[in-house]
Structures are given as C-alpha cells and as structure tokens.
Image: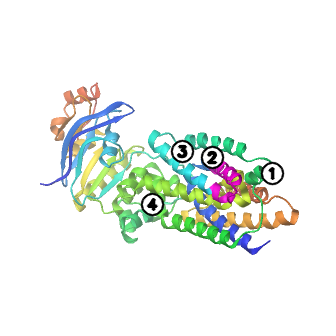
Amino acid sequence: MPWTALTLSIGMAIAAGVVGCFAVMRRMSLASDAMSHVALPGIGLALLFHVHPVVGGLAALLVGTVLVWGLERRTGISTETVVGVVFSLALAVGSLLATGEELVDALLGAPGRLGRWELALGLAGAAAVVAFVLAQRGRLVIALISNDIARTSGIRVERLELLYLLAFAVTVALGLRYLGVLLMGSLVIIPAATAKHLARSLDGMLAISVAISVCSTVAGEILASRLRLATGPVIIAIAAGLFLASLFLRRRR
Amino acid sequence: MANALEVERLSVTLDRTEVLRDLSFTVPEGTALAVIGPNGAGKTVLFRALVGALPHRGAVRWAPGTRIGYVPQKLDLERDIPVTGRDFLRAKAAVSGEPQGATARALELVNLPRAVAEKPIGTLSGGQFQRLLLAAALVGKPTVLLFDEPTAGVDEPGEERLYGTIRRLQEAERLTLLLISHELSVVYRYATNVLCLTLEHPCLGPPEEILTPERIAQVYGEPLKYHHH
C-alpha cells in the first residue's frame, strides 16, 4: 500500500475519532450516519462535470450542513428529524445522478493513487478538525450539559453548533474515498460509541476512540489489500467487532 | 442601592401562546428574589428570557459587569456519558478564564467531596448533581446566581444543606440571587422579595405581603399549606 494513502487514512481516522465522541454524546449517532449521505449528489454532479469527486462531495456536505443548521434554528425541529428528511432526499437524488460502478465506488469507497495535493489538503483538513475539537472541547462539554449554562458562560451556542457540524462534514469528506458515503458515518460513530462504554472520563474517551478508529482503519486497509476485498467494509467490520467486544468487557466490569 | 437587574415590560410568546405579558420588576444588588407561581406560569421561561435564550419583547437590563451563574432545573442528559464532574468544572474554568484552582475552591464551597467530582456525572445522585451544577456556576465568579428549583429531586436533609449553602454564599460573596421555588417555607425564610407569576395578576413584594393565605389561594387556585419556621 502506498505510504501516502496510509498517512491520509490515519489522519482521517484521528479526526473521525475525536469528532465522533461529541456526536455520540449528543445523541447524533443516527443523524450523523445519515448526514454522510448528503455527499452523494455532490459526487454525482462532480462526476458529471469531470471535477474531483471528493470536491463535489465536500461542497454538498458543507451546503447540507448549513441547511440543516438553519432549518433547525428556524423551525425548532430536532436535528435527527431534519437530517433524516434532507439527507434521505440527498441519497435519492445522488443515486439518480451517479450510475453503475461509479455509484458503488461512491457508496462503498475505492482505493486508488493519491496525488500530492490530495494528501496535503486531506492532512490539512484532518489537522483542522482535530485542532478545532481539542481547542473547543471545554465549550463543547458545557454546551453538551446545558445550552443555557453555555450561554450564560459567554459561549455563542449557535456558532459553536455550526462549527461543530462543519468539522463533522469535513471529517466525512476526508473518508469518502476509502469508506464511501454509506460507511464513513460509521467510522465516526462506532469507535466513539465503543469508547463511551469503556472510558471513565472525557480524556479517556477521546484517547480510546482515536485508538480504535486508527487501529480499525490501518488493520482494515492491510487486510483488505491482502484479501483483495473492498477497504471500507473491512474497516467497518473490524470497528464493529471491537464495539461488540466492548459490550462484553463492560458487562464483565 | 443599585439594581442588579431591571426588567421592563417583558413579554414572551412561545408557539403563539403568550406566556409572559408586560412583566416589569427590579432586583436590587445583593438581594434574593424568589419567583413562585403554579406550573405553567412561565417561571423557567422567565429565567431563560433573562439569560437571552428565548426571543422576547421589552427590556432586560443587567448591571454593567454582571456575570451570571445559571443552575438549570433538570437536564436531558444521557446517563452513561463518560464526562466527570471534574471535566465539567475544568471546562467551565477554562471558558471563564479562571485558574484551574478555582474548581477546588468551588467544590469546597458546595461541600462536594473530590472523589464524587471524579465520577461520571450520570452516576451522581440528584443532590450531588445539583451541588455540582452550583459549583460550576460559582467557578465563573458570578455576581448573580439564577436558580431554577434547586432542590427538585433532592431529599429533605439534602435540601436544607443546599439552601444553607446558597445562603452562606450569598452573604459571603455579596451575590444577587434569583430563585424559582415551590417550597414556600423556604421562600419565606430566604427571599428579600417574592415575584408571584401569573399571566393576569403578577405581584411583587416582600414575603410577608405576598405569602398570605388569600394571595396564595388566588395564585395557585386553591389554599396551599405551608409552614413558617
């Protein structure tokens, strides 16, 4: 496996690990899985106009994120509901735009050679996401416990929410290439959900989540290339296996 | 005496229902205002409007330099999140620009043992969690404390301790206190003024004037028993 691909996937896995912790604690598990679907129409359009698919996917994710954030604020409907409706629609539109093999690649991810600029941009995106979550973790924790406490502590809750969702969208975009639209949401959620079972503090949760995310990704890539299988499903199968093992561990504690 | 808070003709409408209408009152610095009223009278809505969490008409003026410590009523939190009391207090200190030592002092002030603060917040008892929220409110060196039913879910001795703590803090730190409570005996003992919230006849005055059997019957729609200590 080329080192560029491995480096980028580790960056992506770290970002997924930290972003996922807050998604899981905010009960966004289902929403965030659906949220990754919005990339599909963007990928479809990008293929149609011969643009890099990840660029199309990222653009669609960012637009979708701002849309969800705005709808939630205006209508007061829960994120779960808004995301469910908007992103199921996106999946439908996307499937119409992309066809055949392209669609399978977009949904499940496909390995391939990476250009230098792809690597650089990907790593920069991953670093930005990780830096954001770590720098804002105090604010995110307070907003998680109570938006009203956050507000009286001088935190601009709506802005924080938007920035978090954008970080989430960037994370999903980072994984589009390997894991595809259907599985990237799972890499954000499963390691964090596992860490939630095992950790006894926030630092512990972040560390365990990143460790599981990186291990599943690296092991999945190596295994998939040895066995000549699609990368994404193998990564997620490993992460899900660790999740099941964590259930067992928790019961024994 | 200067006012910590001035509210002028405050109205809040939620889902096309008018919850508060033309409410005006002031809270002098260093005093305790208790807000009472039947369920659905808009007590929590009032607090949330005061901290800017709800759209409203009218004016809410806090004194310059006001720092608010808010202790909400109940939180819709997952019980199994691995965030400890210490994680929460450290976050609060970081956001408020306070040194991390402020968290230890806050825990002392509310009599919450360190070992309890190291546990995930979902595993704390009702009283411990309330005291943790109070500690978090104190970390930001507030000048005003807003308390929404501080003793909901707390047993009676716990309630006494919590009110004792609040009273001690108020006197020691010269805090202004706004408090929502159903415990009229507590209100009688601790409040400087009582704001009795109903849409039609809100009234404000010292406890001796407001907490009369006739007034209470009028507000709650039935005679309510309470005892003076």
Q: Residue at x 84, y 65 (%)?
A: A225
Q: Which residue is mark 2?
A: A30
What is the chain identity of the residue bearing mark 2?
A
| Residue A46 magenta | yes
Give the vertical position of A78 relative to A107 (above or below).
Answer: above
Which residue does the numbered mark 4 point to in the structure image?
Answer: A139
Whole-percent x, y for residue A106 in the image: 73, 53
Q: Quadrant of the N terminus of chain B?
A: bottom left
Give the numbered dot on residue B103.
none
Picture coordinates of residue A67 (x, y %)?
52, 47
**Chain letter, disc 3 residue:** A
Mark 1 vs mark 4, CA separation in Å: 43 Å
Can you identify the residue that label 3 sits on? Answer: A79
Q: CA distance from mark 4 to mark 2?
A: 23 Å
State which region is magenta: A33-57
The reply to the same-chain question for discs 1 and 2 is yes
